[in-house]
Amino acid sequence: MNISIILAHPDPASFNHAIADAAAAAASRQGHTVHLHDLCAEGFDPLLPAAEIPRDADLPDLVALHCREIAAADGIVIVHPNWWGQPPAILKGWIDRVIRPGVAYRFDEGDSGEGVPAGLLKARAALVFNTSNTPERRECGVFGDPLETIWKNCIFVLCGVTEFYRRMFGVVVTSTADERAAWLAEVESAVDRYFPGRDDRGKM
């Protein structure tokens, strides 16, 4: 299987980087091909220029690479912090430039103006791992957990990925080393569960 991991955090020492590394290690142990992109490290430009909006636009090499990999992915892992109930700007720009018509979705003729796309992504599942310094009760009770809505309902379901798992880790700023170790074990377990290796798939 091809597993695409997209990481959006500017600090290489962040817990987000540890999550992405744990996910990549688990997928590699299962025998999968892993494509890990640290958007900040590779300097991904989040701005969508007007020339890229048409479906048949000529894309820059890096954007074209991301499009090819996400279209070919059998599994997708997204890792980012919760910043004001949203992904970081660089990841929002990645969505704008990569989750594009002809790659992740299409609008069929005779849509009758409903604007509901047909999903094109072939990934069997998408996992989203977030970090937060807001307690879960407040996140859900006061803010309504907007990241769940963004990733599940607004992106992956509409792009054809119906198996979805998301885990928010927090409160990170007060977490202990033991808590962080347990969280990383959860990440590896989720990757093993949703993207089993060939031998494990035969047992299912």
Image (tube, helix red, strand yellow):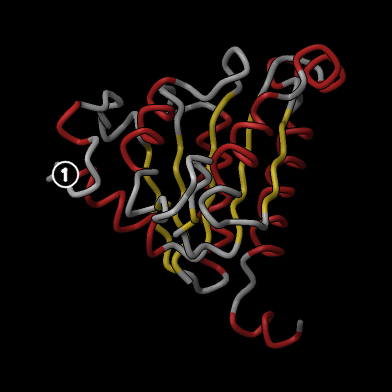
Residue at figure coordinates x 64%, y 85% from the top left: 199
Percent x, y for residue 50?
A: 19, 27
Left or right of 59, for residue 32: right
Amino acid type indicated by mark 1: Ala
Residue at figure coordinates x 64%, y 58% from the top left: 191
Left or right of 178, for residue 71: left
In the rendered image, which quarter contains the C terminus? bottom right
Left or right of 17, for residue 125: right
| Nearer-the-camera pick, 193 or 173 | 193
Q: Which residue is mark 1?
A: 57
Percent x, y for residue 51?
A: 15, 32
Residue at figure coordinates x 77%, y 20% from the top left: 144
Q: Quarter of the image holding residue 45? A: top left
Q: Quarter of the image holding residue 108? A: bottom left
Residue at figure coordinates x 69%, y 88% from the top left: 202
Q: Is residue 116 above or below residue 81?
A: below
